[in-house]
Image: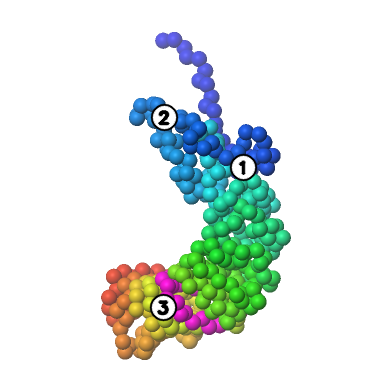
Amino acid sequence: MEARGPIPKRTKFTAPKIQEVLPSREALEAPGHGPPPSAHNQQPPPGAGEDEGSADRISNLPDTILGEIVSRLPTNQGARTQILAPRWRHIWSSAPLTIDCEGLPADNEVLAGIVSRTVSTHPPPCHRFCVPSCFLGDRASTVDKWLRTPALDNLQELEFWFKPYYRPQPLQHPPPSSMFRFSATLCVATIGNCNLPDSTVQGLHFPLLKQLGLELVSISECSLHSLIASCPAVECLLISHGFGFCCLRINSLTLRSFAVKNYRKGNDQLKELVVENAPCLQSLLHLDFDYGLHISVVSAPKLETLGCLSDGFYISKPDDLSRFVFGSTVIQGLRVDRLTTVVHAVKNLAVNMKILSLDTIIELMRCFPCLEKIYIEVKILHL
């Protein structure tokens, strides 16, 4: 048997960093770099003349379809498609832009640099712009500059997200006025970590907005109602860690899903929710198990999903438990205090319990006789 030579080492492939893939302004302005060639003079893509078994079917797709595919990828993955092959080199720079900071470097300085370079070099349109809400406080002037760039004209999705931490408090200053220059085109908006004064909310109108999120926002009760009313097409509404209002009344002909969450009980946080008229509402979620909220449902004939009913893991006083009222039927925590009329529309119910009690579940099933699914989370106390 002949002796074999040394086995060659395998070459380790390392994916390039997002900073290395994004083109610089100089590169975009250099001769030869520009929009893709037009359809009449564009060379056939690689694999066009090959047999079906080895053809690259994805690369054979038209540029417009490839651009739509790339624009739906996370920002870091979309930018890296430029290194796949020469055929893909111009796709990301000519596709609709999506900036989503999820998955990008966590360092704020590096992240801000990536966003600045991208919005200043990438041509419009931009469909989605999602950055951390902390930039509204740390880099307010930079955010204002981003929002005013032509690349963001006719923006459809705008999100300033925040990560919850212990006892959060919203920033006291309002967001830049440039945030609302997209009001006529926005379909999705999440406003986070800021103060919305009455003067800012007054006169706003979002004719196409379908999803609205308010996270760690300080806003007066009057302005909150005005903001919701300014969204005649809204279907999904989220209010998380809201300050400055104690009562919210829902009157919407289009709203399908509503969720509310508060980190802790405070004098300037939501205490009462009244669903006065919501003919399309299908989902009503209270996401904070240990925060007592009084919810009254006056008219929501299509309400199918309800949650979360809880006996309060950290609540010792029964009066501090959440209360759901359907007409004259009252549910305090998990206890049905008064059962005069049953709720036939609800089919899905979420329950959070300290200790599993089948008697309690059966009592709730009497209140919601058309239930199809019950989601139960149990936290057993070890005394």
Residue placed furthest toward the front = 40
- 339, 150: nearer the viewer: 150
The answer, for residue 9, to whether it is visible in the render is: yes
Magenta-drawn segment: 244-261
Quarter location, residue 152: bottom right
Residue 380, position as x, y percentages in the image: 42, 71
Residue drawn at 56 percent across, 61 percent down? 158
Q: Is residue 22 left or right of residue 275?
A: right
Q: Earlier in the sequence, mark 1 or mark 2?
A: 1
The residue carrying pointer 2 sits among few (fewer than 14), some (14 to 19) or many (20 or more) residues within 10 Å by Cα, namely few
- Dot 3 falls on a residue whose secondary structure is loop
Quarter location, residue 17: top right
**Residue mark closest to the camera, 3 vs 2:** 2
- Dot 1 falls on a residue whose secondary structure is loop
Q: Is residue 365 magenta?
A: no
The answer, for residue 266, to whether it is visible in the render is: no
Q: Could you tell me how far apart the alpha carbons at marks 1 and 2 are, in whole angstroms?
A: 29 Å
Q: Could you tell me how far apart the alpha carbons at marks 3 and 1 are, in whole angstroms?
A: 46 Å
| Numbered badge on residue 261 | none
| Numbered badge on residue 48 | 2
Q: Earlier in the sequence, mark 3 or mark 1?
A: 1
| Numbered badge on residue 22 | 1
